């Protein structure tokens, strides 16, 4: 092996040249080191000071002139041990920071899953997903809830869904369109705690259902169309919109 291999343990080219010169010359001044090593005289002190910090050379002042000497090569092992201890400390620091860093990374790098479903089978798939995802004490948030274009079929579907919802025990805050106010089949369950409902004067067949970082857009046509978007930023934005509408809606 050659002294150039000392780069692998963290020495720079200049440090290796100075160290090699000291091994050859023994105790030396700056001028002698510059001549032997090829390192510029103006840089010898900087390079030598770094080697002093690493503990692999020593220095002494004689008659006002600094003389440098190579330490016992065994000191390289001490240098490596010190590096290992520093790396261990840095690893511990990274381990402590990792949960915070991962949370930030996942937030910024979050992928968006989009799924489109059709018909009443699509409705069943989507709403079964809500029942599965939510636990007792958790809530979903709905606005734009309407009679639907095919209101009879919608009443049958939601009656079945409400049974599953009630059994699971999660809560819902819902803003119905005004035209649903007299539809007891659709509203009765939301008079019971922990559910809450309000009404808003609007005419739309588009319902938006928010749960677990998911936005479910529902066009309640004769053959419903559903667009499911799983993205925290989108869900948070729609939740702010819901909160504004909730304040506007009447009990």
Image (spheres, rainbow, N blue to C red):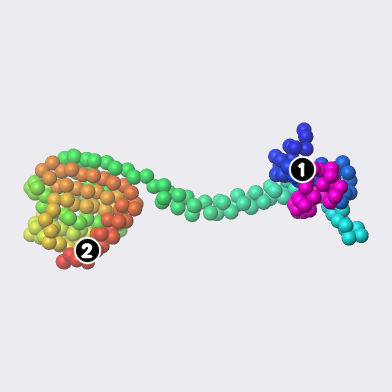
Q: Is residue 73 visible?
A: no
Q: Name the residue located 13 percent from the left edge and 58 percent from the top edge.
A: 202
Secondary structure under tag 2 reads: helix
Mark 1 closeness class: few <14, some 14–19, many ≥20 residues within 10 Å: some
Considering every residue shown, the one lying at the far top of the view is: 1
> Magenta residues?
30-57
Please identify, in this view, whether the residue under mark 1 or under mark 2 is nearer the observer.
1
- Label 1: element kind: helix
- Residue 192 is left or right of residue 82, and the answer is left
Find residue 183 and report its horizontal and vertical position in percent.
Answer: 9, 57
The C terminus lies in quadrant: bottom left
Which tag, 1 or 2, sits closer to the chain's start?
1
Label 2, on which residue?
Answer: 246
Q: Which residue is mark 1?
A: 16
Looking at the image, which residue sits at the far right?
63
Count neighbours of disc 2 (C-alpha within 10 A) and say few if under 14, some if 14 to 19, many if 20 or more: many
* Residue found at x 52% / y 51%: 98
Q: Residue at x 34, y 52 (%)?
A: 232
Q: Position of residue 73 (x, y in %)?
A: 82, 43
| Residue 66 x/y as whole percent | 86, 56
On screen, residue 196 versus residue 22, left or right, reads left
Q: Foreground: 152 or 113? A: 113
Q: Is residue 181 above or below residue 15?
A: below
On screen, residue 62 versus residue 249, left or right, reads: right
Q: Is residue 44 magenta?
A: yes
Which residue shows up at 27% across the image and 50% down it? Answer: 215
Is residue 226 at all visible to an observer of this figure? yes
């Amino acid at each position: 092996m050659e002294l150039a291999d000392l780069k692998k343990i963290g020495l720079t080219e200049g440090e290796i040249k100075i160290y090699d010169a000291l091994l050859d010359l023994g105790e030396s001044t700056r001028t002698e080191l510059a001549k032997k090593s090829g390192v510029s005289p103006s840089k010898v002190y900087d390079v030598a000071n770094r080697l002093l910090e690493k503990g692999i050379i020593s220095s002494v002042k004689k008659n006002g002139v600094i003389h440098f000497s190579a330490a016992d090569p065994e000191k390289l092992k001490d240098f490596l041990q010190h590096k290992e201890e520093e790396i261990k400390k840095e690893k511990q620091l990274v381990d402590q920071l990792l949960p915070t860093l991962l949370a930030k990374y996942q937030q910024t790098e979050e992928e968006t899953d989009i799924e489109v479903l059709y018909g009443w089978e699509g409705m069943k798939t989507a709403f079964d997903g809500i029942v599965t995802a939510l636990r007792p004490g958790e809530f979903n948030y709905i606005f734009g809830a309407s009679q639907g274009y095919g209101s009879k079929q919608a009443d049958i579907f939601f009656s079945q869904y409400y049974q599953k919802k009630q059994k699971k025990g999660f809560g819902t805050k819902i803003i119905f369109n005004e035209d649903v106010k007299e539809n007891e089949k659709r509203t009765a369950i939301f008079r019971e705690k922990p559910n809450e409902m309000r009404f808003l004067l609007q005419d739309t067949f588009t319902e938006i259902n928010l749960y677990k970082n998911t936005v479910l857009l529902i066009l309640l046509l004769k053959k419903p169309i559903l667009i499911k978007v799983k993205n925290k930023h989108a869900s948070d934005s729609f939740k702010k919109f819901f909160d504004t509408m909730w304040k506007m809606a009447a009990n």
